[in-house]
Amino acid sequence: GTCPLVQCAGQPVLPVGLKDEMGADTVKIFCPKCQCVYHPPPVRSRSSHHGGAGAAGVDGAAFGTTFPHLFLMTFSNLVPDPLPQDSSYVPRVFGFRVHSSTRQRAGTGTSGSAHASSS
C-alpha cells in the first residue's frame, strides 16, 4: 500500500505491529517518509475470495515492532528522503493562517461569560 498523507506523495508503506504479544492488536502500516503509523485501509470485495478477513485479521505480532526498522536498516537504499520542514499543512481561513491558540479549548469558558454579561 501507500501512505495516506498527501505530503508523502504515495510513499510505499511497510507492515508493523504495535505489540509483540499475540492477539494484542492487528497489523498497522508504517510510512518511512513521515515516520507515522496508520490503520490499513479496509480490504474491498477481493477479500471475499480469501476468507473475508483482510488486513484486519492479521495479527500485528506476525510482523512485530521490529520489522519495518530492521528492513530499512538492511536495505538502506530504500530509505526515502524525509519530508521537508516546509511541507507541513498550514490551516487557513480565507487565506489567513489560523493561530494555534484557536485550536485550544477555552479552560474557563471566557466566551460564554461575555455572552452572559451582555444579557
Image: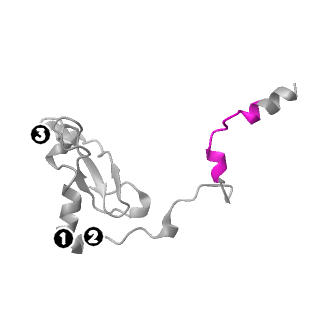
Residue 79 numbered tag: 2
Residue 63, placed above or below residue 69 = above
Q: For the residues carrying marks 3 and 2, which lies nearer the camera in this image?
A: 2
Q: Which residues are magenta?
A: 100-112
Residue density around tag 2, few if under 14, some if 14–19, many if 20 or more, within 10 Å: some
The Cα atoms of the two marked residues, 3 and 2, are separated by 32 Å
Q: Say if the magenta span includes residue 106.
A: yes
Name the residue beneath numbered marker 3: 50
- Gap in angstroms between the C-alphas marked 1 and 2: 7 Å
- Give the secondary structure at mark 2: loop
Image quarter in which the C terminus is found: top right
Q: Nearer the viewer, residue 50 or 96?
A: 96
- Tell me which label, 3 or 1, sits earlier in the chain: 3
- Amino acid at circle 1: Phe
Name the residue: 53% across, 59% down. 89
Q: In the rendered image of this protein, does residue 39 appear above or below residue 115? A: below
Q: Amino acid at mark 3?
A: His
